[in-house]
Amino acid sequence: MSSHAKPALAVIGGSGFYDFFDNEATNVEVETPYGAPSAPIAVGEVQGRPVAFLPRHGKNHEFAPHTLPYQANMWALRSLGVRRIFAPCAVGSLRADWGPGTVAVPDQLVDRTSGRPQTFFDGGGVHVSFADPYCDDLRTATIKSADDVLPMKGAGTMVVVQGPRFSTRAESRWFAGQGWDLVNMTGHPEAVLARELEMCYAAVALVTDLDAGLEEGSGVHAVDVFAEFKRNLVPFKDLIRRSVAAVTETDTCDRCRVHTGVSLPFELP
């Protein structure tokens, strides 16, 4: 791969997903107006195509969900040339029929976080369209890349909670009662920041547990979540690689270009 090749595609790895490339990769240090990203960004190849990889929580899981440098992460990827992002993540299931090992490609998001910087536009009257928070092109690429190893659900609503604690049983039952399917701690503001920078973005969620309201046991424990994610990590990574390879266009799709006709207070990187 040329040292000058710009990665138009990126993968942001979640809990337990700290590396991506089997072949040689180059680590790139990127500084942004929002500080440094979670880790140096690795640039390697997937079927001969340059791809960027960023471990969301850092190489050694230094960052908790509520302390992640979300703005720096998104800005750094955009500044390297990234325009389309796959975002694998660990989730709890709010449905008894979506058990551990299930992969879901959500089409909707509910934000229940608080206190996180969630925009690049603190002035200037910029309001982005977010009715459909995930890129249909990337969702379709993942759904079409599925095999029989990990059962696939091609839609669903993911509620994002503040963390780092897990939900109470009452909260979990309330979420499920709203008709929501998955619970996660990092999907917001990551998705909206990608949209503000006009990057296509799709979450790819690996179920690690049934949330507390669905079971009568002792509730969700982090050690069990990490163990379940690790158990499925090899086929999950393979799914992400196949999803990346399935993307034919590498520029932002028309639906994720939300600033057309809008005067921005600064130039996008």
Image: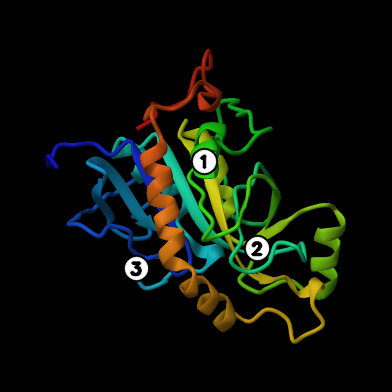
Residue located farthest toward the bottom when viewing the structure as drawn: 218
Q: Secondary structure at mark 1?
A: helix
Residue 194, position as x, y percentages in the image: 49, 39
Question: Helix or strand or loop: what does disc 3 sit on?
Answer: loop
Report how many numbered discs are placed on residues in the image. 3
As drawn, is 245 to the left or to the right of 195?
Answer: left
The label nearer to you, 1 versus 2, is: 1
Q: In the structure shown, which secondary structural element does the residue marked by tag 2 occupy?
A: loop
Q: Which mark is residue 144?
A: 1
Whether residue 191 is visible to the viewer of this picture, yes or no, is yes
The C terminus - image quarter: top left
Q: Quadrant of the N terminus?
A: top left
**CB-based contact (under 8 Å), mark 3 and mark 2:** no
Residue at (25, 60) in percent of width and height: 22
Residue located beneath label 2 in the image: 162
Q: Which residue is mark 3?
A: 59
Given residues 217 and 164, the one toward you in this image is 217
Lateral position of residue 26 relative to residue 194, left or right: left
Q: Earlier in the sequence, mark 1 or mark 3?
A: 3
Q: Earlier in the sequence, mark 3 or mark 2?
A: 3
| Amino acid type at image mark 3 | Lys
Give the image location of residue 232, x and y in percent: 49, 69
Q: Nearer the viewer, mark 1 or mark 3?
A: 1
Identity, as a three-letter code, of the amino acid under mark 2: Gln
Q: Which of 181 and 146 lies nearest the eye of the viewer?
A: 146
Q: Residue at x 53, y 28 (%)?
A: 256
Alpha carbon distance from label 1 to label 3: 30 Å
Q: Are marks 1 and 2 in contact (CB under 8 Å)?
A: no
